[in-house]
Amino acid sequence: RTWTVVSLVLAVAAALLVAVGPERASGADGAGGRRWITDGQGRALVLNGLNTASSAKSAPDGMPWIHSADVAREKRRLGTNFVRFLIQWRTIEPRPGRYDDRYLDEVAARVGWYGSRGYHVMLDMHQDVYGPRTKGNGAPAWATETDGLPVAEQGQWELEYVQPGTLRAFDHFWGTRRAGRNLRARYAAAWAHVAARFAHDPAVIGYDLMNEPWGGSLQGPAFEAGPLAALYRRTIAAIRSVDPDSWIFVEPEAVSANWGLPSGLPYLKDPRGDGDRARIAYAPHLYPLPMDLGGGYTGGTRAWVRRTLGSWRAQTERTARRLDAPVVIGEYGLDATRPGALTYVAEVRRTAERLGAGTAYWSNDPGPWAPWRRSKGGRLRATKLLAVLDRPTPLAVAGIPESYGWDGKSHTLAVRWEGAAGVTGGTEVYLPERFFPDGGRVTGGDVVSWDAASRVLVLRSGPGDHHVRITPAT
Ligand code: 9MR
């Protein structure tokens, strides 16, 4: 039965991909023309990091596996400036209307580990398969109504989303089946509680309202433009009543958008205002279907995945334009020991550079998906993935980025931007030791500083166009 469902899903997805077709991005083939998430100095941020952590989902206290030293290691080995940090409704609101502030204190302590090292933290209200009562994670037991319907464990965990009990729990959450308790109001209130706690924490850049939303028995644009948008509007209003400034990240329906299909998510107004005032960002995930099913990046699968990447990028640009939102790829990742996996990861990073999108790799949990694994003695050892994730990149651009990207063939990091009024500080780029053992040679710009410990080079900014190229110093 599993395989019947899988082949059905494959057939539908293939048909839709053909219908949608691989599109060329309209306009300039670059990062220009879109909104940017900016830092306190008005610089456009290129968010680059990992998800922390899958282990938090099943930990009774909801904490990820990391200690402060693990954050230090990540900074040292990958030069990251961003983390998508998992939190869960079950640990925030263990009983209806009762919030666990000790849990939020523990979250805040970990946010501090990142913040003290210059990271920007996105808090992600995670769920998979609704909650523990439906064999998933996220929602508290008191908010899980299955009407006694079963959830049978599946080999492929995603298939638990279509088990009767899971579908029913989602239908009751969204209120699409009958008028019952308004769980959406609880969810929005829980978010407001979290936002009130972190509104003035400078390390927290914003909030990812719901991981990989799933409509239960309501699917596609009817779900995204209906109950999902309604929940987002309600939650945005609740958050803005306590936190006027943090970014709010919204995700599309995962099952379609993750595979490069269109999203029907509508424009979401920010009470802060429209245009440059608004701080709503788009944070889709990228998991090409053949890889969800365990395929590598070779042969026919590779051709299909490449096609998905093209269509995913076009659809993401289209939705981001509609939302007038910057883009952060909240998750991409795979078992990096599979054939071709490392090439795929580099391909995704290139796609993100062309989109001008931030990225958070899934995930930092030691193992075959991660840049490190545990040795028999329990120590962390780098995997081959680490070298691919440790990629030269701008971290903050002092103006409006036009394009940027690392060319691994010519060993050149190119960054083009236009200086903008009101921006202070220079453009910061990360130059990993593996490519820049003696630092960078800069053409088309002036170096303000180079810090060999953090491997961050600061470039002078100012008005006008900047076309900087950085190659390894010899
Ligand atoms: O990698 C995670 C896997 O070990 C878990 O069994 C599964 C269910 O909790 O979740 C996986 O992580 C997923 C994440 O929660 C949501 N996006 C897709 C991730 C990879 O499948």
Image (cartoon, rainbow, N blue to C red):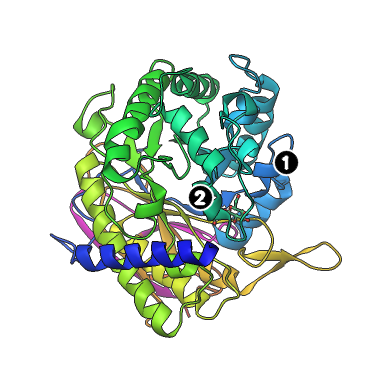
Is label 1 in a helix, a strand or a loop?
Answer: loop
Image position of 293 (left or right of 422): right
Q: Residue furthest left?
A: 27
Name the residue: 71% across, 45% down.
68
Q: Is mark 1 within 8 Å of ligand 1?
A: no
Q: Which residue is mark 1?
A: 59
In the figure, residue 185 lies in which quadrant?
top left
Name the residue: 62% across, 23% down.
142
Q: Amino acid at mark 2?
A: Asn
Q: Amino acid at mark 1?
A: Ala
Image position of 293 (left or right of 11): right
Of 382 and 207, nearer the camera is: 207
Residue 372 image offset from top left, x and y in percent? 67, 64
Is 461 magenta? The answer is yes
Q: Residues within 10 Å of mark 1 (few under 14, many from 20)?
A: few
Label 2 vs 1, first from the N-terminus: 1
Q: Are marks 2 and 1 in contact (CB under 8 Å)?
A: no
Image position of 362 (left or right of 313): right
The magenta span reads 447-472
Image position of 140 (left or right of 470): right
